[in-house]
Image (cartoon, grey):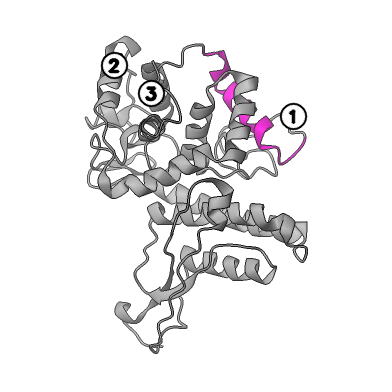
Amino acid sequence: MTTGDDSMKRVTLTRRQFGTGVAAALAMPYVLRFNTTEATAQIVRGTWSQLYSLSEEAQRLGLSVPRMGLAPAAAEEDFTELQPAIVDFMDAITASAPDAPGATSVEIDGLLDRASELLRTSRNAERPPRDIPEGPQAAAVTPPKFEDVADDYRRLFETCQIRSENRSTVQWYVSKIVDAARRKSYEQVFEETCVPWYAVAIIHGMECSFDMTSHLHNGDPLKAKTVQVPKGRPNPWLPPSDWVSSAVDALRYDKLHEQADWSLPRMLYRWEGYNGWRSRLLYKINTPYLWSFSNHYSKGKFVRDNVWDPNAVSKQCGAAVMLRALVEAGHIAPPA
């Protein structure tokens, strides 16, 4: 084996998107690139190589999944690229499973579970749990009054511009929100809770990366009750693997089903409060939880529990930016 970073090879993926939804995932092969030099067969162990192995396994089972190939070490463990790759892979498995008679339900579930764990690990590394002011480095803050920040939310939303370098990634987020199968589930949750379907979708994107095999509460695997805070949800949990009933429980747990006001400023206030106020109040920036990928955010984030890095940049699209993109694309009317 040759030494040196320049000689190492990784799995890399190139996405070509053709529309939205599960059908798009199937029509979205990753470009297969073969490097004929000495180190082509060397794969650096990491998320990309694990996804590569899952893809090979899925193809052996007759499932139609995005193709992957080896390329020089150009792919980083970057959440901006990892999240779409893993989610599209899972969507492709789900869509092609009925046409793959050689794949058993156990094998399909196993692939989805392992891909979901890759996604969960990657997401947790990018965005630590919600900002809870506990521990020796924590600083407690008093949330601002809604009346004092409502106009600020309106101004920020009206002047929000998606950064050009992030626009294609934001469009991927939109494609998952309006995907027919997901939207059907979001609307079922709306019927049970009166939380707008697009608000459910954006929460799902922020907390679970649109993974339909994870609890909306905290991204824990759907096949059992949650183990992270809030622990032991839903209660009771019957039947298992039912995303809609779990999502309904999550929204009821946070009492969102009791909220009648889903106006623009109230929605953004609620989302910012969910993730924490310290970005705004202590570090004087617009929280990346709302504004990442837009002109209203450039850098600064918590990199670990209660550890702030003023130069770190969020690799996850903000909730308000997703909302703005939905409005710009005409999928929803501008919230009042």
Q: Is residue 322 above or below residue 33?
A: above
Q: Earlier in the sequence, mark 1 or mark 3?
A: 1
Give the main secondary structure of the magenta stretch.
helix
Decide whether residue 302 is among the magenta residues: no
Residue at point 31% right, 41% down?
293
Residue at point 61% right, 43% down?
212
Give the residues in magenta.
Answer: 239-259
Contact between marks 1 and 3 (CB within 8 A): the answer is no
| Amino acid carrying mark 2 in the image | Val
Residue at point 54% right, 19% down?
256
Residue 322 coordinates in the image, percent (x, y): 40, 35
Residue 131 coordinates in the image, percent (x, y): 40, 33
Badge 1, how many Cα within 10 Å: few under 14, some, many 20+?
few
Residue 59 coordinates in the image, percent (x, y): 63, 69
Please name the residue that numbered disc 1 is placed on: 236
Foreground label between 1 and 3: 3
Please name the residue that numbered disc 3 is placed on: 268
| Amino acid carrying mark 1 in the image | Pro
Q: Marks 2 and 3, Cα distance to the nearest angstrom?
A: 10 Å
Q: Is residue 236 above or below residue 90?
A: above
Closer to the camera in the image, 233 or 154: 154
Badge 2, how many Cα within 10 Å: few under 14, some, many 20+?
some
Please name the residue that numbered disc 2 is placed on: 149
Badge 3, how many Cα within 10 Å: few under 14, some, many 20+?
many
Residue at point 69% right, 67% down?
62
Closer to the camera in the image, 91 or 180: 180
Determine whether the residue tagged by mark 1 lies in a helix, strand or loop: loop
Residue 238 coordinates in the image, percent (x, y): 77, 33
